[in-house]
């Protein structure tokens, strides 16, 4: 029997900004709403399966759609907010009465985009790319109180860009 593979190339037609900030997601969301003049609201979290863990990683998601300007804003946490059980064997753990060890609770959390491990949040602005709009948005993001760094990211250069498809 012949095996077929389907190669799909997704179109990443959005601007991506990596944001470093030591604020909780709801505070960053509130401040972005004020500076950008939008109304981000909380949605169901994004779930990402990691092969080394039993549970899915969860990433917070805030959305806003501007129908008049045909823009969509998505604010995602880049770091998962849940601790997950690891599938890796824990050699240092002692077995229980029946000779079994419990899965180890992973202290470290996963990243949505591993290459951007310094970013706490990702802001996706869905519209056609415009260098002027990207620059203006980046400058506005830099004025947000609590934001340490902002970086425009070229999505096509990311190895884990498929994690941004939701």
Image: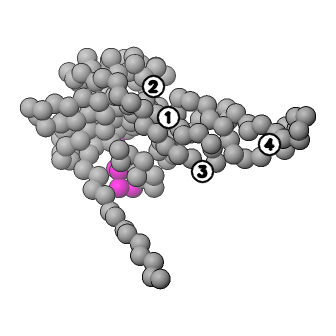
Total tally of numbered discs in the picture: 4
Q: Earlier in the sequence, mark 1 or mark 4?
A: 1
Please give the name of the residue rendered at 26% of the width and 38% of the height, measured from the top-left corner: 125
- Residue 156 within the segment the image draws in magenta: yes
Pointer 4 residue: 90
- Where does residue 158 sit, x and y in percent of width and height? 42, 53
Q: Calculate the distance from the C-alpha at mark 2 to the C-alpha at mark 3.
A: 28 Å
Give the quarter of the image for residue 10.
bottom left
Q: In the image, which disc is placed on residue 21?
A: 2
Instruction: Kindly state the secondary structure of the residue where label 2 is placed.
Output: strand
Q: Is residue 153 left or right of residue 126?
A: right
Instruction: Kindly state the secondary structure of the residue where label 1 is placed.
Output: strand
In this view, which residue lies farthest toward the left? 68
| Within-10-Å neighbours for mark 1: few <14, some 14–19, many 20+ | many
Please give the name of the residue rendered at 37% of the width and 69% of the height, measured from the top-left corner: 6
Please indicate, yes or no, whether residue 136 appears anywhere in the rendered image. Answer: no
Residue closest to the eye, 102 or 26: 102
Give the quarter of the image for residue 93.
top right
Instruction: Kindly state the secondary structure of the residue where label 4 is placed.
Output: loop
Pointer 1 residue: 58
Q: Calculate the distance from the C-alpha at mark 4 to the C-alpha at mark 2.
A: 34 Å
Pointer 3 residue: 51
Quarter of the image for the C terminus: give it: top left
Camera-near label (2 vs 3) is 3
Instruction: Kindly state the secondary structure of the residue where label 3 is placed.
Output: loop
């Amino acid at each position: 029997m012949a095996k077929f593979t389907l190669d799909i190339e997704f179109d990443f037609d959005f601007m991506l900004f990596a944001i470093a900030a030591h604020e909780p997601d709801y505070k960053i969301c509130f401040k972005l709403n004020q500076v950008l003049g939008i109304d981000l609201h909380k949605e169901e979290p994004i779930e990402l399966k990691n092969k080394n863990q039993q549970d899915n990683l969860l990433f917070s998601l805030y959305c806003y759609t501007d129908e008049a300007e045909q823009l969509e804003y998505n604010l995602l946490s880049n770091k998962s907010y849940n601790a997950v059980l690891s599938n890796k064997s824990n050699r240092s753990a002692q077995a229980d009465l029946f000779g079994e060890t419990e899965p180890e609770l992973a202290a470290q959390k996963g990243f949505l985009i591993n290459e951007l491990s310094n970013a706490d949040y990702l802001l996706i602005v869905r519209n056609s790319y415009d260098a002027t709009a990207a620059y203006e948005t980046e400058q506005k993001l830099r004025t947000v109180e609590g934001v340490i760094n902002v970086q425009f990211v070229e999505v096509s250069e990311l190895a884990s860009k498929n994690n941004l498809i939701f």
